[in-house]
Amino acid sequence: MSGPIGVYDSGFGGLSVLRALRARLPEADFVYLGDSGRAPYGGRDVHTILDLAEQCVERLFDEGAAVVIVACHTVSSVALRHLQARYGTERRRVLGVTIPAAERAVGVTRGRIGFLGTARTVASGTFATEVHKLAAVEVIERAAPLLAPIVEEGWEESEVASAAVARYLHLLGEVDTVVLGCTHYPLLRRAFEGALGPEVTLLDPAPHVAERLVDWVARHPGFVGAGTGRLRALTTGEPTRFAELGQRFLGAPLPAVECLHERDGKLVSGSGGASVGQVVR
Ligand code: DGL
């Protein structure tokens, strides 16, 4: 029943979460699935996200994982309960990032939390809901849809990044804590730190997600096998680009990236062939 830990994200961003997970569980084996061929998810409708998430989580279970971490804040915000109800059993679990993010934010705030994420994450209101289960504090959530593409372009250190970050922080107004509620945003840390005063706490939830996972693994023996620190990486996107960009998120080179494509509602191995020009079906 025990195997590698599955980690799922809409694309590369979850590799920033995987980085934190591997730092805390260096012996564990991981299998990462980035759905970059169908990302970004952040502006998609809820039912499309549920469909995509089902396929990805099923594939990770098929890879032998007994526990899957949904590293993507968008999926975690709108689809976690669905995935847990559909796939969770005594032998299989699906865990998310929203509750750890809310716990950490409540732990550091002085009363006004700002949260930036994708349009879908913010529209769900799930982060605020989880915070309010823990504490009566104010939560201001704003969508920051320009930030993930800036990171994907490799423009984190640019004036474009600084201007966009400053603009979104302005939309949050006066807050004492800023939560990076999207897996891409930790790469913009420098731009955030440059724009925020020292009195504001900048919170990347990933280390807390890792801390909670370590605790969960200790309380749930048998879900994670004794590994050797092996990593496999799967993508629905272009593997060379995935390996190049992914390295920036993971902070280390990726192993050979394996290709997946969708066939009849399932993710199967192989590239599926590029579609060039018109497609008739
Ligand atoms: N991984 C997504 C998240 O954390 C961001 C990128 C996307 O829109 O797919 O919300």
Image (tube, rainbow, N blue to C red):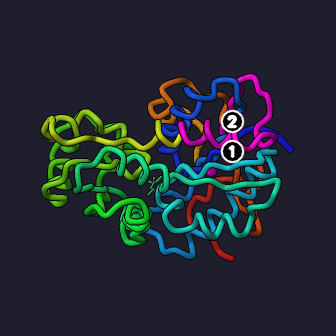
- Quadrant of picture, ligand 1: bottom left
Q: For residue 108, what is the image quadrant?
A: top left
Cβ atoms at labels 1 and 2 below 8 Å apart? yes
Q: Amino acid at mark 1?
A: Gly
Q: Quadrant of the C terminus?
A: bottom right
Residue at figure coordinates x 36%, y 60% from the top left: 135
Q: Of callouts 1 and 2, which one flags the residue occurring earlier in the amino acid sequence?
A: 1
Residue under numbered circle 1: 6
Callout count: 2
The quadrant holding residue 59 is bottom right
Which range is magenta?
Answer: 210-236
Label 1 and label 2: CA atoms lie apart by 6 Å
Q: Residues within 10 Å of mark 1 (few under 14, many from 20)?
A: many
- In the rendered structure, the answer to whether residue 70 lies left or right of residue 262 reads left
Q: Quadrant of the N terminus?
A: top right
The residue under label 2 is 30
Q: Residues within 10 Å of mark 2 (few under 14, many from 20)?
A: many
Residue 137 in the image, given as x and y percentages of width and height: 28, 61
